[in-house]
Amino acid sequence: MGLLTFFLVSLLASFSSAEISAKVGVNYGQLGNNLPTPSKSIELIKTLKAKRVKIYDANPKILKALKGTDLQVSIMVPNELINSISTNQTLADQWVHTNVAPFYPDTKIRYLLVGNEILSQPDKSVWFNLVPAMRRIRYAVKCHKLHEVKVGTPLAMDVLESSYPPSNGTFRSDVSVSVMKPMLRFLNRTKSFFFLDVYTYFPWSSDPANIKLDYALLRAKNITITDPVSGLTYTNLLDQMLDAVVFAMKRLEYPDIRLFIAETGWPNGGDIDQIGANIFNAATYNRNVVKKLMAKPAIGTPARPGVVLPAFLFALYNENKKPGPGTERHFGLLHPNGSNVYEIDLSGKTPESEFKPLPKPTNNEPYKGKVWCVVTKHANKTALAGALSYACGQGNSTCDPIQHGGKCYKPKSLVRQASFAFSSYWAQFKKLGGTCNFNGLAVPTAKDPSYGSCKFPSVRL
């Protein structure tokens, strides 16, 4: 009986350690019109020596391509189904029956995430349906006997209303009691993870004067920050952000729920007004994250020393159809043709000295000078006409110079007309929150697009 007990305890311990082993994976986004096939993508993921992969849906072609591989897989229930699933167990059962059960266990599906950054969405109605939807999906998983699948949901750092110092970490008052408390109860009861999207790039780039770049890149040698309440000392921004969430959970009386980094990364490129988005910083950050997370014994964070942090880096590819500023399309470890943006080994076993030298960064200081807003290459002409109409429809004589008889009137050149409208709109409305994007049709440039007597408005950075 003693031997049997010992065997069972050992077996449980091995399952437990396997489940939370230090493995770094990659987020496989699909918002590109030039990406390799799923089977080719899985081969590329293997060359990166990733041990996990997360997708943002339950794409059957990808799940089939993952069959028989050793990659642990995370899939996602789309945001738009959460409201319906929250009140309909049959729908939850059908979703799991169709999207998970046919592939399990040959495809190592381990994590089923309900939605993506739901508490960052403007539609508040879905916030309060998130945990009920998680419960129904979890029940469906149990009914289908998918014993190794954990249910969770990834949240962004904006779920906190206070994060500095880390000991002051507090969930937002609009979700703390109504959403976070029941969610933490669910995660605790099901022994799941708090999945967190955490990027040091964004706090650093919004305040580079006060946050040191090396501190954000996990390469600081002599920079430390001591939390005046906890007394814990921080040597990098990632630990500081993670521990703010740890303290927020502790504040709601759930101090022991494990963290799982659902996304982290650094952009390898971006728009001219986006500081620090370059290959050098991206490679430095991601290599340092891998080195930290794969260290043996585990390093953990100051609030949780020695605790394993499983993680997914964002992202596999530079995805050309992602909306938003230029950085959004430049988080990839790989170009769409499958080549490396920079060398990286997600197993952490390749010494830094074996990587090729990185290009020196040129935009670690804010750009100073005039910037214009122009049409991107290969912009869709139909969409462009609509964006031109929108920019000109905002008033303030935005488009007077491109009207008939104006100095910039070019009726046969939609691109020039739209570029003027975009520049004029941005120059007038940037201070009010206007952006140079227009659903991906526009990009900032330091090259003056003016011609002849037609002078394009600009903004000064």
Image: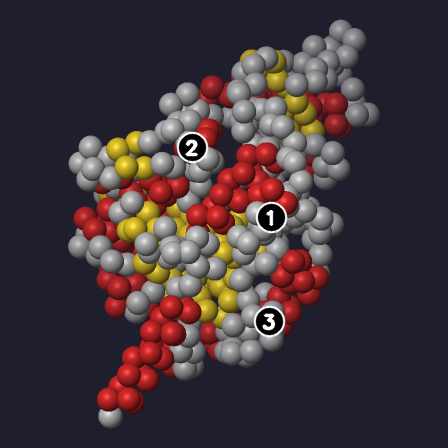
For the C terminus, the image quarter is top right
Please determine whether, in this image, residue 421 is positioned above or below residue 287. Answer: above
Mark 1, residue position: 344
Q: Which amino acid does label 3 sit on?
A: Thr
**Residue in front for this viewpoint, 143 or 264:** 264
Q: Can residue 277 be seen in this view?
A: yes
Image position, residue 168 (x, y; %) = 22, 38
* Circle 2 or circle 3, nearest the eye: 2
Q: Residue at x 60, y 42 (%)?
A: 353
**Left or right: 265 with respect to 207?**
right
- Label 2: state its secondary structure: loop
The numbered disc on residue 69 is: 3
Neighbours of disc 2 within 10 Å: few (<14), some (14-19), many (20+): some
**Left or right: 3 with respect to 461?**
left
Q: Which residue is drawn at 22% across and 55% down?
A: 255
* Circle 1 or circle 3, nearest the eye: 1
Please determine whether, in this image, residue 321 is positioned above or below residue 83. Answer: above
Q: Which residue is drawn at 52% across and 44% down?
A: 286
Image position, residue 364 (x, y; %) = 54, 24
**Left or right: 366 with respect to 308?**
right
* Cα–Cα span, label 2 and label 1: 20 Å
- Label 3: state its secondary structure: loop
Q: Which amino acid does label 2 sit on?
A: Ala
**Residue in front for this viewpoint, 238 or 14:** 14
**Residue in front for this viewpoint, 212 or 173:** 212
Neighbours of disc 1 within 10 Å: few (<14), some (14-19), many (20+): many
**Residue in front for this viewpoint, 455 or 267:** 267
The numbered disc on residue 220 is: 2
Q: Can residue 322 be seen in this view?
A: no
For the N terminus, the image quarter is bottom left
